[in-house]
Image (cartoon, rainbow, N blue to C red):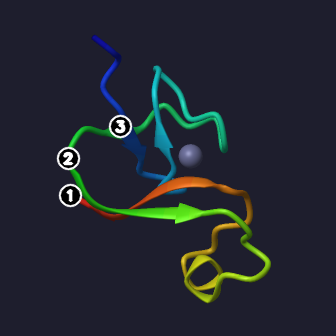
Amino acid sequence: MSARARACRNCKKIVVGNSCDNCGSTDLAVNYSGLLIVLDPEKSRIAKELGITKPGHYAVKID
Ligand SMILES: [Zn+2]
């Protein structure tokens, strides 16, 4: 139906495709857990703790 989402090991972003649209890394993990949806990184404390600076979907933990 749709391409499987994977998590970027470099920046934790959830991506669909062969490379991360956030940092350009091709090191993508199929196995990840947790989903963090960041709408406004400036106002999100957890986003700052994880070093997230752009809105998007992120994995909390990558295996
Ligand atoms: Zn990335």
Rendered view: 7 above or below 16: below
Q: Earlier in the sequence, mark 1 or mark 3?
A: 3
On the image, the x and y values in percent for residue 30 come to: 24, 38
What's the CA distance linking mark 3 and mark 2?
A: 7 Å
| Residue 42 quadrant | bottom right
The outermost residue toward the top is 1
The label shown at residue 6 is 3
Three-letter code for the amino acid on which mark 2 is drawn: Asn
* Mark 3 Cα-neighbour bin, 10 Å: few <14, some 14–19, many ≥20: many
On the image, the x and y values in percent for residue 63 come to: 20, 58
Q: Is residue 59 left or right of residue 12?
A: left
Q: Earlier in the sequence, mark 1 or mark 2?
A: 2
Q: Which residue is mark 2?
A: 31
Rendered view: 42 above or below 29: below
For label 1, the SS is: loop
Q: How many marks?
A: 3
For label 2, the SS is: loop
Q: Which residue is mark 1?
A: 63
* Mark 2 Cα-neighbour bin, 10 Å: few <14, some 14–19, many ≥20: few
